[in-house]
Amino acid sequence: MMQARPMFLQATKPIGFAAALTFSLWGGAFAAEITVEPGEGASEKLLEALIMAQPGDTVMIAEGRYELTDGLSLDVDDVTVRGAGTDRTVLSFKGQTGSGEGLLVTSDRVVLEDFAVEDSKGDGVKSKGSDQITFRNLRVEWTGGPKAENGAYGVYPVSSKNVLIDGVTVRGASDAGIYVGQSENIIVRNSLAEYNVAGIEIENSFRADVHGNVATHNTGGILVFDLPNLPVQGGHDIRVFDNEVVDNDTPNFAPEGNIVAIVPKGMGIMVMANRNVHVFDNKLDGNATAHVLIAAYPNDYEDENYVFVPRGVYVHDNSYGEGGFEPDGEVGKTISDVSGTPVPDIVWDGVTTIPEYFSWTASENGVYVDEAEGTTFVNLKMISQLLLPWGWWPSTDIAAHAGSLPEPEPVKLPQDGGA
C-alpha cells in the first residue's frame, strides 16, 4: 500500500512553486491536487508541478493561455494532468526554443485531459513506453495551417500499451494527426483529425479499434501501415469502423523522405502491409484519389523478417459517395493508368509474395470484399504486370473476392472499464 507522504513535504511542496495545493484521501494515502495559474512564472510553476508530482496527484492547469519556451515532461506514474477545456486552457509553444515535444510522458496510468497544445516545434503530446495512457478531450493544433515545418505528430503514443485516445482534435500535423506506433491494445474514438497529412495512423501495432472518428480535409484519412526496420513488426488485428472519412483534399505537405509523403491527396482509408484488418460501417465520400486502397509496401528495404504485403483484409458494409474523380500524384497516376477514371471505390494493388503468386494464398491471408450492389472494385494485378508484362489485365470482378474473416475481439482497456 502507498504510504502517506511525510508532513514536511505536504507543508513545503506548495512553497516551491507557489501553486494551490489541496489534499484528498486516495487509495489510503493523501493525494494532492496541484493548481497552476497563468501569469508571471507560470511556465516554471507548471514544469515544477510535473516534476514534483507524486503518484495519485492531479495537476490542474487553470483557465488561461500559457506561453512556454521549453517542452514539458512527466515521468511519474498515476498522475492526471487536467485543464479547464480545450479552448480555455491553452499551452502555446510558439516560442519554444528546442525542437522536442510539447509534452512527453514516460510513465504509466497517466490521464491527460481538457487542454490544448499549440505550435510545438516537435510532436504535440507524446507518450513513450507507457502502460494505461489516456488522451481525453485534447486539442493539438499548428495554428498557421498545414506546413512542412509543423511538428510531425499531434497525439503520439509509441511503444505503449493500453492506449485510449478519446475526444481528441488535431490539426496541422506534417505526418499524422493521431498516430499510434509500435503499441498494443489501442482505442481511438470520437476524435477529429483534419488538415493533417495523415488524419489517423496505426503503424506496426497490435489490436486496435478505430471508431466513431471524423477524418476530413487531410491528405489521407485513416492509414493502417506496417513498415520495415522497426523494433516491433507484424501489425495485426485492427478494426476500422463507424468512421466518417470524407473530403480528404489537402495537398501532401510532409517533409521529403517521410513515408507518408507517398500518400496522394484524396486518399480515404489505406491499408499497407498489415494483417487481419477489418474495414466496415464507415462513411466514405469526396475522396478524390480512392476511398479504400489495399497495398504492398512500395520501397526497397533490407529487413529479412519484414512481410511487405497485406494479409487478411476484409472490407464490408461501408457506404461510398463520390470518389476517385481526381487521382493525385504518382500513386494516383499508377492506379488510374490501370483502372481508368473515376478510380473504383476499392483498389487492391494485387501484389502477393512470389510463392503465393505461383501456388495459392491461405484463406486467412486473402482479401475479401462484401459491399452493397453498385460498389466498384479493381484488382490492379501489379504482380502480374511485373512477371507477365505481355499478358495481364486488371480485374473488376468484386465477386471474385467474396468471403469473410473472423472479426477480432473488441479491444478492452483497464482504464476504460475493461479487464
Image (spheres, rainbow, N blue to C red):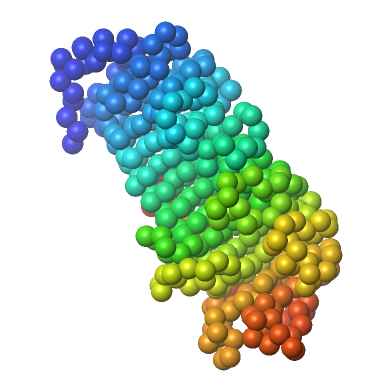
Q: How many marks?
A: 0
Tell me which corner region of the image, top left, top right, bottom left or bottom right, holds residue 360. bottom right
In the displayed structure image, the side of residue 165 where residue 254 appears, left or right: right
Quadrant where the image shows the N terminus:
top left
Which residue appears at 40% of the width and 42% of the height? 127
| 30 or 65: nearer the viewer | 65
In the displayed structure image, the side of residue 412 where residue 309 appears, left or right: right
| 349 or 69: nearer the viewer | 69
Residue extending furthest front? 256
In the displayed structure image, the side of residue 312 where residue 382 appears, left or right: right
Tell me which corner region of the image, top left, top right, bottom left or bottom right, holds residue 112. top left
> What x and y, as percent, mark residue 279?
63, 62
Residue extending furthest bottom? 359
Q: Is residue 44 visible?
A: yes
Compared to 166, does 388 lie above or below? below
> What x and y, as percent, mark residue 12?
21, 12
Which residue appears at 24% of the width and 15% of the height? 13
> What x and y, as percent, mark residue 401?
69, 78
> What x and y, as percent, mark residue 237?
50, 64
Compared to 22, does 257 lie above or below? below
Tell me which corner region of the image, top left, top right, bottom left or bottom right, holds residue 9. top left
| 90 or 1: nearer the viewer | 90
Q: Is residue 289 visible?
A: no
Which residue appears at 32% of the width and 39% of the height? 107
In the displayed structure image, the side of residue 270 where residue 23 appears, left or right: left
